[in-house]
């Protein structure tokens, strides 16, 4: 998503005046960075757009010029970028509590996070701990995840049916992106609301969710030019509020129905069928008189759960399958490992090369190239610089994952780098000991869904390779260029020719 950068605020100035302004606008205590002008800061560096390729290239160049920690002034806000893995470890692990805040949203944008009552946006404090602990213990605990074995099989069957239907036309060619997204969304909706909805309801939820997220993603200007954003962009804010209202119209009845029915729905052993909404309905906020979550907060938390569990995983799955199409020998090695696998989720731990493929996919193609912005909770001296309280700190996942000092032949897809002596190293990517890659972040605000995401990627990738041979489309090359939507996706969606494995074995 690209954002025009108010060029009229900059390009009307002559070169002489601009140079003078830059020279007089220094902030020596902050980490180094390019000269900045009052009001607009370093917006001229983004004169084209905030697109992914521009930002990645810019950070790479700034690292070479200023070092691994740099400051850009985007509008009136100083934004600090960390591009080195060892510095990320020092910040997120050694000084974890200080670097675990979130930037405070402007009053006009508080509705986006229901006044910071979602896990990803909550301030580092009691509400964040309560919401995160609920998610980890009540929904993401292994005992809970095992309850959705039937749901995972159901979601994959939906995916397999769609791929087979596509492959039966057009000489077996499929474009699986939408099918990946739909199957993953069905599974996460089941985990959220506790129901296997039909396609009509799923599409209603999906449209409400995606329309809101895509528009909300365009509101990044609220961070960059807060002094004028609320005034000049009232229309965009109004659209976002209306899309949130429409999302609420879809989600609220589902939450209400779950509240009314959850005590009646039981499994054969008499235990209630579980959902994320069930856990949310039990939460009370001690810091707010012990009240229960209100409807707006419930909708916002459900929206967060659906987006976190769907888009990043579906995006990563497409990247991984694209690499397997591009690298047929690696696909063959994976097939040799899983061809005798019976499909049990418990046995995924016995497939080390599968795990290596997933890890390499996440390293080379992280679904987000920057972590969600952190903020320091107090002034801190870091690497000789003063980072003021509430400063926005950004960590470049992509820059670290492609660091040649850490990864030999970093641009190559080599799953074997995650193998040791023929077995998976099952690298610890929590970053507790060291950080080499962090597609899920690190430290106290590491993504709580890390384990579930890897598990889902292993489950779907293993089943896709077990059921189909994924071949190149004759005369076409796999294009691994990127573009930014809600996540970092393939600029040109994967096209592949599928051959069912049963047919191959019969031959």
Image (cartoon, rainbow, N blue to C red):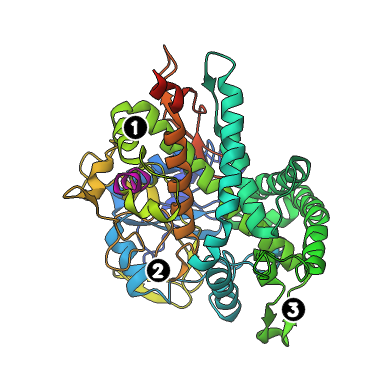
Marks 3 and 2, the one that precedes in the sequence: 3
User: Do the CB atoms of the residues marked 3 and 2 lie less than 8 Å apart?
Assistant: no
Q: Quadrant of residue 446?
A: bottom left
Q: Is 318 in the magenta?
A: no
Residue 314 percent across, percent down from the top left? 53, 43
Which residue is at the front of the view, 27 or 389? 389
Of circles 3 and 2, the one toward us is 3
Q: Quadrant of residue 429?
A: bottom left
Question: Extreme left residue here?
Answer: 421
Residue at screen point 27% across, 39% down? 414
User: Do the CB atoms of the residues marked 2 and 1 lie less than 8 Å apart?
Assistant: no
Of circles 3 and 1, the one toward us is 1
Residue under label 1: 331
Residue 213 in the image: above or below residue 447: above
Which label is found at residue 292? 3
Residue 191 percent across, percent down from the top left? 63, 58
Disc 3 and disc 2: Cα gap in Å? 29 Å
> Element under label 2?
helix
> Element under label 1?
helix
> Element under label 3?
strand
Q: Is residue 397 found left or right of 384 in the rendered image?
A: right
Residue under label 2: 443
Which residue is at the front of the view, 224 or 415? 415
**Range covered by the magenta-colored residues:** 352-359
Residue 175 percent across, percent down from the top left? 55, 26
Disc 3 and disc 1: Cα gap in Å? 49 Å
């Amino acid at each position: 998503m690209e954002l025009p950068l108010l060029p009229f605020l900059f390009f009307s100035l002559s070169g002489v005046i601009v140079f003078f302004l830059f020279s007089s606008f220094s902030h020596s205590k902050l980490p180094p960075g390019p000269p900045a002008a009052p009001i607009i800061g370093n917006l001229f560096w983004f004169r084209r757009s905030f697109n992914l390729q521009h930002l990645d290239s810019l950070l790479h160049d700034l690292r070479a010029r200023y070092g691994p920690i740099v400051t850009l002034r985007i509008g009136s806000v100083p934004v600090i970028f960390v591009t080195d893995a060892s510095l990320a470890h020092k910040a997120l692990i050694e000084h974890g509590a200080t670097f675990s805040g979130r930037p405070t949203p402007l009053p006009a944008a508080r509705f986006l996070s229901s006044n910071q009552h979602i896990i990803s946006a909550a301030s580092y404090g009691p509400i964040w701990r309560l919401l995160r602990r609920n998610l980890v213990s009540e929904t993401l605990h292994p005992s809970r995840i095992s309850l959705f074995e039937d749901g995972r099989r159901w979601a994959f069957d939906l995916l397999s049916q769609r791929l087979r239907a596509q492959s039966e036309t057009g000489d077996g060619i499929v474009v699986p992106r939408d099918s990946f997204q739909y199957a993953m969304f069905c599974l996460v909706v089941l985990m959220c609301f506790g129901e296997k909805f039909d396609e009509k309801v799923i599409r209603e939820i999906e449209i409400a969710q995606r329309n809101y997220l895509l528009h909300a993603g365009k509101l990044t200007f609220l961070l960059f030019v807060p002094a004028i954003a609320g005034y000049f962009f009232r229309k965009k804010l109004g659209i976002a509020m209306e899309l949130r209202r429409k999302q609420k119209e879809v989600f609220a009845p589902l939450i209400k129905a779950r509240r009314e029915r959850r005590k009646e729905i039981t499994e054969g052993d008499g235990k209630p069928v579980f959902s994320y909404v069930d856990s949310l309905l039990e939460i009370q906020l001690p810091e707010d008189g012990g009240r229960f979550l209100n409807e707006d907060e419930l909708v916002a938390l459900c929206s967060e759960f659906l987006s976190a569990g769907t888009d990043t995983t579906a995006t990563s799955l497409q990247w991984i399958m694209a690499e397997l199409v591009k690298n047929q020998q690696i696909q063959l090695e994976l097939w040799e490992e899983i061809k005798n696998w019976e499909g049990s989720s418990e046995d995924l731990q016995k497939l080390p090369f599968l795990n290596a493929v997933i890890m390499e996919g996440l390293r080379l193609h992280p679904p987000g190239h920057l972590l969600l912005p952190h903020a320091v909770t107090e002034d801190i001296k870091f690497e000789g610089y003063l980072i003021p309280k509430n400063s926005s700190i950004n960590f470049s996942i992509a820059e670290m994952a492609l660091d040649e000092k850490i990864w030999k032949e970093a641009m190559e897809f080599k799953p074997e780098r995650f193998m040791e002596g023929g077995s998976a190293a099952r690298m610890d990517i929590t970053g507790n000991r060291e950080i080499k890659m962090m597609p899920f972040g690190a430290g106290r605000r590491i993504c709580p869904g890390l384990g579930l995401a890897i598990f889902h990627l292993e489950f779907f990738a293993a089943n896709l390779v077990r059921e189909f041979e994924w071949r190149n489309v004759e005369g076409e090359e796999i294009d691994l260029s990127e573009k930014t939507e809600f996540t970092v996706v393939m600029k040109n969606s994967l096209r592949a020719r599928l051959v069912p494995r049963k047919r191959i074995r019969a031959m």
